[in-house]
Image (tube, rainbow, N blue to C red):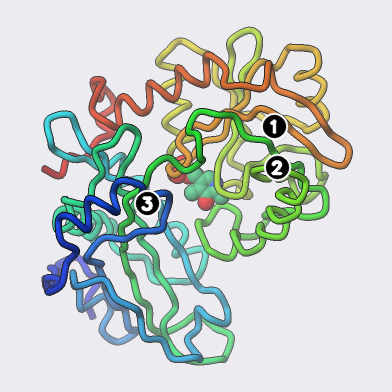
Amino acid sequence: MSNGDALTFDIEKNSKPATASERETLLQNPGFGRIFTDHMVTIRYSQDRGWHGAKIEARKALALDPATVVLHYAQEIFEGMKAYHLPDGGAALFRPSANAQRFHNSAERLAMPPLPERLFVESVRELVKIDREWIPTAEGASLYLRPFMIGSESALGTRPATDYLFCVIASPVASYFKGGASAVTLWVSENYTRAAPGGTGAAKCGGNYAASLSALAEGQREGCDQVVFLDAVEKRWIEELGGMNIFFVFDDGSLQTPPLTGTILPGITRDSLIKLGRDMGLTVREEPYSIEQWQADAQSGRLREAFACGTAAVVTPIGKVKGRKHNFTIGDGNAGATTLRLKAALTDIQFGRAPDKNEWLDRLF
Ligand SMILES: *Cc1c(COP(=O)(O)O)cnc(C)c1O
């Protein structure tokens, strides 16, 4: 049985790729996750053969039996990462081995066979190389990569699937929120929680997102952009947004972010910003922060800024917070100076504009 360590990719090029002019038109206004490149990666797993059949092929619809496990029991995990266009015409990934490790951890949590980390990174690298013409060059734009894995066996019995499909697709993206640096309004979810102790909050799985959508719809009805979730036990400790971690900036210049207690997704952007903040000489605490304290500190001025962070949305300032019992503005409601400084420090490394002292970039060509 193959553990996947020695797999190589069969390459079947798309016989009808987009023409250069079609691609250029699409790249002018990519939005987020709306357009896709010419190819995809697929690797299969079966109980008796292990990992096999690694392929780069034309992007196409997947054929799934209606009884496929993922369609019924949501045995699915994913990653989100980006390839960045560099000033010399090359391209790089940002900390891909951190995504590979997290994918491994998510697989274990959902009782899926872990894909070897080398194979994960190789898949993403190969896809970016074959679709390199799709990496956008506009300011702030990048090629978003979406590796994912599903239970692909057809069976309605509840148990882990025997067969799996790993797949990587790629999507050129502009910035996630319209307007880029403008601040978002958060809805404090009191009716819904996202993750409970012992649950899947620390795994990157589609089920967590499914569970967050009613809260998002509620927030959007209240005129908010995103939801901030509180802990499931005491309903007072701030955890994170539906798909982003959160940071607070205080009047003494210090930063704080909720600790990774198992119900929060361990963001790679979060981890990178903790390091960059400390490199700048700032104090960064990983400590719990309550919603009441946040409101009190925002009103007294002790809390100066807050921002959300993640691969898709990068660093997004938080301007206002609303809920049934809450309604407050952060600072003057716009992006704060520390938020913008951290965002610049991170994106300057990602786009190759600043020295990469931590060796975070993985250059592709
Ligand atoms: C992916 C994700 C994040 C951000 O992680 P990054 O590695 O920084 O992209 C934060 N929260 C949730 C729930 C996520 O799924």
Q: Is residue 112 above or below residue 1?
A: above
Residue type indicated by callout 1: Pro
Q: Residue 146, image x and y in percent? A: 37, 58
Between 129 and 54, the one lying in front of the other is 129
- The alpha-carbon separation of the residues under discs 1 and 2 comes to 24 Å
- The mark found on residue 16 in the picture is none
Q: Residue 218, image x and y in percent? A: 76, 54
Q: Secondary structure at mark 3?
A: helix
- The mark found on residue 288 in the picture is 1
- The alpha-carbon separation of the residues under discs 3 and 1 comes to 25 Å
- The mark found on residue 101 in the picture is 3
Identify the residue under disc 2: 224
For label 2, count other residues whose C-alpha is less than 10 Å away and answer few (under 14), some (14-19) or many (20+).
many
Which residue is found at the position 51% from the left and 40% from the top? 177
Q: How many marks?
A: 3
- Closer to viewer: mark 1 or mark 2: 2
- The alpha-carbon separation of the residues under discs 2 and 3 comes to 33 Å
Residue type indicated by callout 2: Cys
Disc with the residue nearer the chain's start (1 vs 2): 2
Quadrant where the image shows the C terminus: top left
